Amino acid sequence: MSDRRLQVFHAVARMLSFTKAAEVLHMTQPAVTFQIRQLEEQFDTRLFDRAHNKVSLTDAGHLVFEYAERIFEQYSEMENAIREMTGNFNGSLTIGASTTIAEYMLPALLGDYNEENPEIRLRLRVSNTEGIVSMIENNVIDLGVVEGPVANKNLLVEVCRNDDLVVVVPPNHELLGKLDETSSLSLKTVLEYPFICREPGSGTREVITDYLQESGMERNLLKSCLELGSPESIKGAIEAGMGVSILSSVSIAKELKLGSLLAIPLNPPLRREFSFVRQRQKFKVKAMDELLDFARSYCQSGKPLIRN
């Protein structure tokens, strides 16, 4: 987009947060503020109200946001039309993935794709599910792969594969002596012990929170957990005896093989979906079609997510 200020404005307007917009756009907060001030000076009016630590759009801001949405959509359509006319589908794609997927699923998939399509340059951005969805909404990335639910009904969401979440404990933990007749554990029993969880905005945390509610428990029970920002840090904390957690089964394959951690199923089982997320107009890009077709075939093939 030729006008970076409009892209920055669009991000702030969507999230109503200068801090979150800066994170999504990989900018500093002062840089975001500077871009907004320049745009406000150009229009000679305020676009945001900032009062009591709350950001809201002014009437002028709402109008600019509506036009920005249309501008970005038409820009994308123009770009796609030129590519189709010229046949120039080479180039790059930027993929965003939530942490679990980026660390344990995409390396093998993207490695195989790159071997077959060396002319396509792939870039990867990693965030939690909330951050990846925001990047899609603001056209920062072409395709997102997330592990949590997506609330924006205007985005295209396509299930890739299912994932089992399990209780993860160190060897000889007390919970091993509390298994029920199905050799599994209830979430209520698990939460009797120090619990380690992902940060708010993580797909894993959101799925566990929903599971809490479905089990008739309070959603805020995770407020007192130890929060860590990645599966790797959580696994290290479990091995150090700091608590137990619930993680994707694909994220602990190495530790299970080494015997440094053990996995226990939940009763009832806890499963979620890994999903592709994209803008509707992005689907017209041939390179995107080819990547999606490859990823669909990869997921359906049952190939292991992690290479030994």
Image: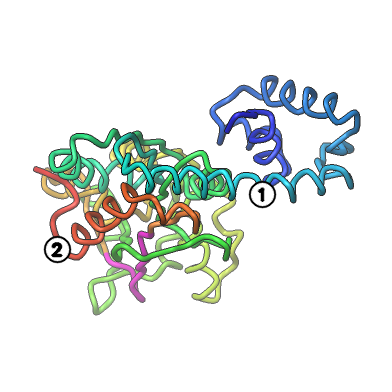
Give the quarter of the figure containing the N terminus. Answer: top right
Residue located beneath label 1 in the image = 69
Q: Which of pointers 1 and 2 indicates the residue nearer the eye?
A: 1
Helix, strand or loop under label 1: helix
In the rendered structure, which amino acid carries the disc numbered 1? Glu
Q: Nearer the viewer, residue 88 or 155?
A: 88
- Comes first in the chain, label 1 or label 2: 1
Q: Is residue 240 visible?
A: no
Q: Nearer the viewer, residue 251 or 306?
A: 306
How far apart, in angstroms, are the residues tagged by discs 1 and 2?
A: 38 Å
Q: Position of residue 194 (x, y in %)?
A: 45, 49
Picture residue at 36% right of the left edge, 65% below the top: 159
Residue sitting nearer the eye, 67 or 109: 67
Magenta residues? 265-275
On whether residue 50 falls in the magenta region, the answer is: no
Question: Is residue 265 in view?
Answer: yes
**Residue 188 image offset from top left, x and y in percent:** 45, 68
Q: Position of residue 247 (x, y in %)?
A: 34, 53
Label 2: which residue?
Answer: 301
The type of residue carrying mark 2 is Ser
Left or right, 252 with reference to 56: left
Position of the C terminus by quadrant: top left
Q: Is residue 272 magenta?
A: yes
- Kindly state the secondary structure of the residue where label 2 is placed: helix
Identified at 26% across, 37% down, the residue is 120
In x, y percent, where is residue 199? Answer: 51, 44
At x 35%, y 68%, the residue is: 271
- Where 222 falls versus 64 (above or below)? below
Q: Viewed as shown, does residue 302 lie left or right of 210? A: left
